[in-house]
Image (cartoon, rainbow, N blue to C red):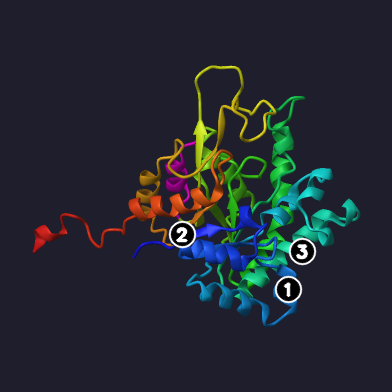
């Protein structure tokens, strides 16, 4: 049985959920991964209104769609980050509160509430970010000691273990999107994060190859390293140019879409990610969850990209073999 193909709604929050669902159904998607911003899925309403979650299911069903996961990246980012004015641009007013008080604690509670809301909706996975107190120290100058990095992982565990304990109570998993600016951004940091949590069973990963490939981390190796921790996937491509030139791989403070960047996100099939190898490896590790298209491409109309992406995945996806290819020799 092929995995469902969904569209992550985060980049479409300017549209009503009803309008986006109509569009996604027309493109051929099986469902939507609902972002917890815009009107797509509102955590506070899910907990205060007993009828709210059913309204989401009913709306999707009218378009022949389902939901397998929700995502709350924005609140999660503020749990471990060192808070500054940038967070006011991504957090809702009820969490930001002009940056006053304990923003981190409010966002930690929001993640707990998100788990409860997911359980009410009937989904088993919440995707998101964790933030990181040590990401600003990544370059290690002024010199950063091993003890300072270790303290960052201790801070992560102290803030997230209570959240994950609440996830476990409601039988929902948290899938960190491994990503620069997070506590885990490659294979080594992901292993350290798991160790810091002592292997908490509610913590795993939302696999997005685009965030690994531009760092020169092999996405397939990530899947092989964490086969039982892949709780969800994002399908997104990335362009990388390693030919020596004028700009650097760190971005040169050039915004996404600038023609001088050495890497940038691309619609599926327009970058360097080997999606057939990834889908084959997902089969090998037994992943049966959604392939969720997170559409980001600064030079392509998003409607074109969304339609093209689902068609691309339909073409290259195939079910796992029911038995070894030489099993028939025994007959």
The answer to if 139 sits in the magenta stretch is no
Please say if the residues under marks 1 and 2 sit with CB atoms less than 8 Å apart: no
Residue beneath disc 1: 45
Closer to the chain start, of discs 2 and 3, is 2
Report helix, strand or loop for mark 3.
helix
* Mark 1 or mark 2, whichever is nearer to me: 2
Magenta segment includes 217: yes
Q: Residue at x 69, y 74 (%)?
A: 46
Residue located at (72% from left, 80% from top): 49
**Which numbered dot is residue 27?**
2
Residue 59 is marked as none
Q: Quadrant of the N terminus?
A: bottom left
What residue is disc 3 on? 109
Instruction: Measuring from the top left, give residue 293's x and y in whole percent.
Output: 50, 53
Q: Is residue 152 above or below residue 162?
A: above
Quarter of the rendering occupied by the C terminus:
bottom left
Tell me which segment is drawn in magenta.
Answer: 216-227
Where does residue 117 sit, x and y in percent of width and height?
67, 71
Residue 55: horizontal and vertical position, in percent? 62, 78
Residue at x-position 77% and y-position 58%: 107
In this view, the mark in front (2 or 3): 2
- Return the x and y of residue 36 as percentages of the image width and height: 67, 62
Instruction: State the CA–CA distance, disc 1 to disc 2.
Output: 29 Å
> Observer-nearest residue: 167 or 4?
4
Marks 2 and 3 close (CB-CB < 8 Å): no
- Residue displayed at 10% across by 58% down: 329
Q: Residue placed farthest to the bottom in the image?
A: 50
The quadrant in which residue 103 appears is bottom right
Viewer-side residue, 150 vs 29? 29
């Amino acid at each position: 049985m092929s995995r469902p193909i969904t569209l992550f709604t985060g980049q479409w929050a300017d549209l009503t959920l009803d309008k986006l669902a109509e569009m996604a159904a027309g493109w051929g998607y099986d469902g939507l991964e609902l972002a917890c911003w815009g009107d797509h899925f509102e955590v506070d309403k899910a907990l205060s209104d007993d009828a709210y979650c059913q309204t989401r299911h009913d709306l999707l069903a009218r378009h022949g769609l389902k939901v397998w996961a929700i995502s709350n990246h924005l609140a999660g980012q503020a749990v471990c980050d060192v808070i500054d004015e940038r967070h006011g641009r991504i957090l809702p007013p009820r969490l930001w509160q002009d940056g006053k008080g304990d923003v981190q604690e409010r966002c930690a509670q929001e993640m707990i509430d998100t788990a409860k809301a997911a359980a009410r909706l009937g989904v088993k996975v919440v995707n998101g970010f964790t933030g990181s107190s040590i990401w600003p120290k990544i370059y290690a100058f002024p010199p950063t000691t091993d003890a300072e990095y270790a303290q960052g992982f201790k801070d992560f565990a102290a803030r997230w273990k209570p959240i994950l304990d609440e996830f476990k109570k409601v039988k929902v998993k948290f899938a960190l999107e491994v990503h620069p600016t997070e506590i885990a951004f490659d294979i080594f940091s992901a292993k350290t994060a798991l160790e810091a949590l002592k292997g908490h069973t509610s913590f795993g990963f939302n696999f997005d190859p685009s965030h690994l490939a531009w760092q020169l981390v092999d996405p397939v190796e990530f899947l092989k390293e964490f086969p039982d921790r892949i709780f969800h996937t994002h399908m997104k491509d990335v362009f990388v140019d390693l030919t020596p030139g004028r700009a650097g791989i760190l971005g040169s403070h050039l915004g996404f879409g600038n023609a001088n960047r050495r890497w940038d996100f691309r619609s599926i099939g327009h970058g360097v990610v080997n999606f057939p190898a990834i889908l084959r490896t997902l089969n090998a590790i037994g992943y049966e969850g959604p392939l969720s298209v997170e559409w980001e491409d600064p030079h392509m109309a998003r409607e074109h990209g969304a339609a093209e992406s689902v068609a691309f995945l339909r073409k290259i996806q195939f079910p796992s073999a029911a038995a070894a290819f030489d099993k028939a020799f025994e007959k």
